[in-house]
Image (cartoon, helix red, strand yellow):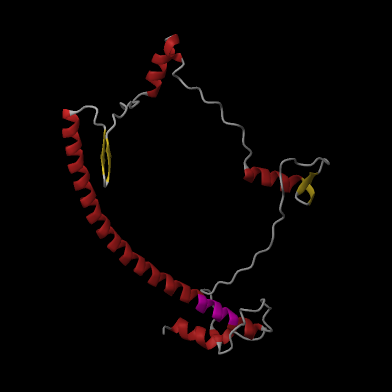
Amino acid sequence: MNPDELLEDALAGEMEPDIDSPPTAPLDLTQATSWVAHLARVRRQREEWDVAYQAAMQRLQERNRVEQARLDRWEAWLEEALEMFHRTVLANDPDALTIYTPAGTMRSKMGQPAVDIQDQEALIKFLLADDETRELVEFPPPPPPKVGKVPLRKFIKDNMVRSSDGVVTLKDGSTVPGVVWTDAERTFSVNTDERQPPEDVGEP
């Protein structure tokens, strides 16, 4: 064990919280210190488990990579060989677009030519110059207006008289439509990496 683990064990003691019961506040700072040590241990164990899990996943991913590469080679070889066969059949019978076998079906179809637009502005100018091609140009509708949440929150905080059930009433007596306001709540956290020296832990 490293010094941090030894400290966690020393501070945690033998008595463990009953996590099958609803949480209750520690009786004093000594018990709170014990539970902080338990929390640090839980977080350390979670990290250790995650390291082991990541190592196992890396091994599994490497095995998967090797197997997928092997199967990819098999698939590519077989597909190319069957394509060569189908091309030979089509050369003798242009209607043989589909070949049925007891193991599966081979199909061939002609794709569409590709159009790669290199200069959108020049192309649009060209198409708009002729009534017959003007309809090829799409004019998307303008984006709808949107309210920024950060400035809206500041505006409400600066001008709000009260809020009830999420409804905001401003100083001029008007209410803000289309908004549900939730008052800020205090949060609590425990940092098990930020510790007092052991000699400073005790009753306040």
Q: Quadrant of the N terminus?
A: bottom left
The verdict on residue 37 being magenta is: yes
Closest to the observer, 81 or 192: 81
What secondary structure is the magenta-colored segment mainly? helix
Q: Is residue 196 visible?
A: no
Q: Quadrant of the C terminus?
A: bottom right
Closest to the observer, 83 or 105: 105
Q: Position of residue 40 (x, y in %)?
A: 52, 77
Q: Is residue 162 above or below residue 60?
A: above
Q: Position of residue 79 (x, y in %)?
A: 22, 44
Q: Is residue 153 left or right of residue 66?
A: right
Q: Is residue 10 visible?
A: yes
**Among the 4 quarters of the image, the one containing residue 80:** top left
Q: Position of residue 76 (x, y in %)?
A: 22, 47
Q: Residue at x 24, y 51 (%)?
A: 72
Closest to the observer, 59 or 195: 59
Q: Is residue 37 left or right of residue 110?
A: right
The verdict on residue 3 being magenta is: no
Q: Residue at x 44, y 18 (%)?
A: 136
Q: Residue at x 72, y 41 (%)?
A: 178
Q: Residue furthest front?
A: 102
Closest to the observer, 30 or 139: 139
Magenta-highlighted residues = 35-42
**Among the 4 quarters of the image, the one containing residue 123:** top left
**Number of numbered tags placed on the structure image:** 0
Q: Is residue 80 left or right of residue 1?
A: left
Q: Is residue 149 left or right of residue 46?
A: right
Q: Is residue 162 above or below residue 196?
A: above
Q: Residue furthest bottom?
A: 14
